[in-house]
Image (cartoon, rainbow, N blue to C red):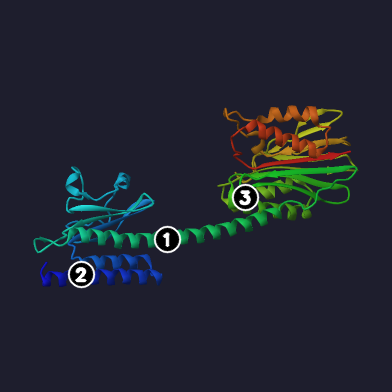
């Protein structure tokens, strides 16, 4: 090799090393992704004098990040997912039907056996001679790999920050939801209430409550909002606050349900709805007034009537205003009873044969076991449901609320 050629080769290597150093310093300085792509563009055009180039990066879909020297723009060129199968350098002449025949070759950039980027290159020749193409390809691969891995690390860092922010949001929403439920339920000689809540996720859209009205009356309720996650939890939080406020203003269930319906519709614009069951029991009068607004009918047992469903009420809340109809259920001479209310996540649990648990199975159990301790009733139902679903997961939140007056 002549002295002049050796000198040019050394100068070229120095340029490449300086370029890699500049890239490394830029990465350490945490420059934006666009700046890294600009450095990539400038480096290859000035150091290797590449005439044509297009850099495609995969991020859920292929996108062209750098393009220069081509007759047509490749910035909006679609790239099929099968290009991810490219694992080695290919001459573009190997592909019969290809939109990239302007280029000489395609160079894949991989990380952990996954193709992250493709570099389409044309014009590696300089002055009609091969300008160290093997060295040039190695430099392109090295430079692209450094850039792409740095950008992947940026994406990973952003994703981790988003996940951490989302985790904190979930924690806040979960804390908010815990305030929905009463901290303590009565467990006296004459009144016992038991509740179980199994959220489908960290947070859910079910709600139950026990609210003393005065020394003789109390309200129990169960509700279920359509949808899941943070929006459902926040919506139910608003619903609980409205219910408690309304109950302080009036004990009339019809008025309360009508007001709740208006508020749900006003807040959600008809995009979500809530099913609701609420009952007020008067200990002195031994009466129960209830409204079932599109909810699964609770099961009520008393010695005189056995098992019956509490179905009187209206349609779901938040679907229309005013409600097309509303009827209060009114039960008299109810001195001793056991009531079981639940949300549809229980009866709609599906087994491995895609069969639902169904309300009949629940009614059959309650008919035979209504006399048991309330905790035992809940444990029995949950264990039975767990065995029924088999390997399937729960698809919805599950809430159980039982009330016994003796």
- When the figure is inspected, residue 308 is found, relative to residue 68, above or below; the finding is above
Provide residue 144's location: percent of width, then percent of height. Answer: 30, 60
Q: Are marks 1 and 2 in contact (CB under 8 Å)?
A: no
Residue 403 sits in quarter? top right
In this rendering, position of residue 381 left or right of residue 97: right
SS at mark 3 in the image:
loop
- Which residue is at the far left? 128
Q: Residue at x 65, y 44 (%)?
A: 224
Q: Residue at x 64, y 52 (%)?
A: 263
Around disc 2, counting alpha carbons within 10 Å, would you say few (fewer than 14), some (14 to 19), or many (20 or more)?
some
- When the figure is inspected, residue 287 is found, relative to residue 364, above or below; the finding is below
- The residue that disc 2 covers is 12
Q: Residue at x 23, y 69 (%)?
A: 13
- The residue that disc 1 covers is 153
Quadrant for the N terminus in the image: bottom left
**Can residue 282 be seen here?**
no
> Mark 3 or mark 1, which is nearer to you?
1
> Mark 2 or mark 3, which is nearer to you?
2
The answer to which of marks 2 and 3 sits earlier in the sequence is 2
The answer to which of marks 3 and 1 sits earlier in the sequence is 1
- Checking the image for residue 202, the label placed there is 3
Provide residue 211's location: percent of width, then percent of height. Answer: 79, 50
Marks 2/3: CA–CA distance: 58 Å
């Amino acid at each position: 090799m002549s002295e002049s050629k050796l000198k040019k080769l050394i100068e070229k290597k120095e340029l490449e090393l300086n370029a890699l150093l500049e890239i490394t310093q830029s990465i350490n300085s945490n420059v934006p992704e666009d700046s890294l792509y600009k450095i990539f563009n400038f480096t290859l055009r000035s150091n290797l004098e590449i005439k044509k180039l297009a850099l495609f990066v995969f991020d859920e879909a292929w996108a062209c990040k750098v393009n220069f020297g081509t007759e047509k723009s490749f910035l909006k060129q679609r790239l099929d997912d099968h290009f991810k199968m490219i694992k080695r350098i290919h001459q573009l002449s190997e592909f019969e039907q290809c939109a990239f025949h302007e280029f000489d070759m395609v160079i894949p950039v991989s990380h952990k056996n996954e193709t992250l980027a493709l570099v389409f290159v044309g014009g590696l020749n300089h002055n009609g001679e091969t300008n160290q193409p093997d060295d040039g390809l190695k430099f392109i691969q090295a430079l692209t790999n450094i850039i792409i891995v740095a950008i992947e690390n940026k994406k990973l860092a952003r994703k981790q920050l988003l996940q951490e922010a989302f985790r904190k949001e979930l924690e806040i929403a979960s804390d908010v939801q815990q305030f929905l439920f009463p901290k303590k339920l009565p467990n006296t000689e004459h009144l016992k209430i038991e509740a179980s809540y199994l959220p489908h996720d960290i947070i859910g859209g079910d709600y139950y409550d026990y609210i003393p009205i005065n020394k003789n009356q109390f309200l129990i309720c169960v509700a279920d909002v359509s949808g899941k996650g943070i929006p459902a939890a926040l919506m139910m939080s608003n619903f609980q606050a409205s219910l408690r406020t309304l109950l302080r203003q009036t004990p009339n269930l019809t008025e309360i349900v009508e007001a709740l319906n208006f508020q749900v519709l006003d807040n959600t614009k008809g995009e979500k709805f809530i099913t609701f069951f609420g009952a007020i029991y008067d200990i002195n009068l031994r009466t129960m007034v209830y409204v079932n607004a599109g909810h699964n009918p609770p099961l009520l047992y008393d010695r005189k009537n056995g098992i019956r469903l509490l179905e009187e009420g209206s349609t779901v809340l938040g679907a229309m205003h005013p409600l097309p109809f509303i009827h209060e259920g009114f039960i008299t001479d109810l001195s001793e009873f056991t009531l079981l209310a639940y949300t549809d996540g229980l009866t709609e649990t599906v087994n491995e044969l895609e069969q639902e648990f169904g309300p009949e199975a629940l009614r059959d159990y309650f008919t035979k076991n209504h006399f048991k301790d309330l905790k035992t009733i809940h444990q029995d139902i949950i264990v039975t449901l767990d065995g029924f679903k088999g390997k399937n997961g729960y698809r919805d939140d599950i809430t159980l609320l039982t009330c016994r007056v003796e």
